[in-house]
Image (cartoon, grey):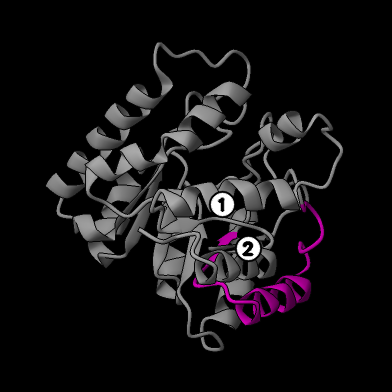
Amino acid sequence: MGILNVTPDSFSDGGKFAATEAAIDHALRLADQGADLLDIGGESTRPYSEPVDVETELARVMPVIEALAPRLSIPLSIDTSKAEVARRALAHGAEIINDITALADPRMLEVAQASQCGVCVMHMQGTPQTMQDDPTYGDVVEEVLVFLRQRRDALAAAGLDASRIALDPGIGFGKTHEHNLRLVAASHRLHELGCPLLVGPSRKAFIGKLMGDKEADRTAGTLGVVLSLACQGVQLVRVHDVAEVRQALTLFEASGGLAT
């Protein structure tokens, strides 16, 4: 899953693709590099980010979705927690809702029910404004499992097809560096839930922390995490560096790295 942030303030690439034409060009480049789907977002969810209103988010993402939908054969995902943004995006060619609040808003659930689109639901402790204040768990893996199981069951009970529900442990969303590493290492546990798995480690702060240099380029570190996830059977990884990830996975598999 290639990341397309149409925002001025995302944590890694904020502002680079805020202009519509720059965003479209980058999306086409990600598709050429081997992205299987694109996740388009118009609101930063980095720690302590400020929310934007519906009109601002729509103004950022809709011209991009409208331009890309007829030009790309790969699915488009709308990264939003706002039901109206999701509804408009789906009406103009998006096929997936990626909601960091796990469809907590009943109106978002109604949009998903009406469209029978794919959905990605994520675990987050708190909100982007509070999630990194003091994230605390008894057992982070078990608590994330319980939450995702409850959301899966609720969505399935509401009529969503379980095969179209992807579950995301929420790396970097209300977790310490140690929590993130535990969740990556235990990603295989999420297969117990019987849904496709989505994990987003790309360029996250825990990688810089582990490397001992928070200012260092995190591409190589991201690749290391992606290979661990691939070995654990994670189906989807949400990444900025599509070409590098595609190359690493291709060579890793060809050289026996994914042999069972």
Q: Secondary structure at mark 2?
A: helix
Q: Is residue 179 visible?
A: yes
Could you tell me which residue is drawn at 28 percent across and 45 percent down?
A: 191
Regarding mark 1 in the picture, which secondary structure is present there?
A: helix
Rendering quarter of residue 21: bottom right
Where is residue 91 shown, x and y percent of the image?
A: 41, 73
Q: Quadrant of the C terminus?
A: bottom left
Residue bearing the label numbered 2: 245
137 with respect to 46 (left or right): left
Alpha-carbon span between mark 2 and mark 1: 8 Å
Which amino acid type is marked by label 1? Val
Q: In the image, what residue occupies the spot 37% across and 29% down?
A: 144
Q: Position of residue 26 (x, y in %)?
A: 72, 73
Residue 239 is inside the magenta segment: no
Read off the residue under disc 1. Answer: 226
- Left or right position of 162 against 189: left
Q: Is residue 24 magenta?
A: yes
Q: Could you tell which of marks 2 and 1 lies nearer the N-terminus?
A: 1
Query: Could you say which quadrant of the image residue 151 lies in?
Result: top left
Decide: few, some or many residues near mark 2? Use Cα within 10 Å; few <14, some 14-19, many ≥20.
Answer: many
106 relative to 217 in the view: left or right: left
The answer to whether 104 appears left or right of 50 in the picture is: left
The residue at 20%/55% (across/down) is 162
Q: Amino acid at mark 2?
A: Val
The reply to whether residue 176 is visible in this rendering is no
Q: Position of residue 99 (x, y in %)?
A: 44, 48
Crowd class of label 1 (few under 14; some 14 to 19; many from 20; radius 10 Å): many
> Which stretch did the figure color magenta?
13-40
Residue 108 at x, y percent in the picture:
35, 49
Which residue: 78% across, 67% down?
A: 19
Q: Are marks 2 and 1 in contact (CB under 8 Å)?
A: yes
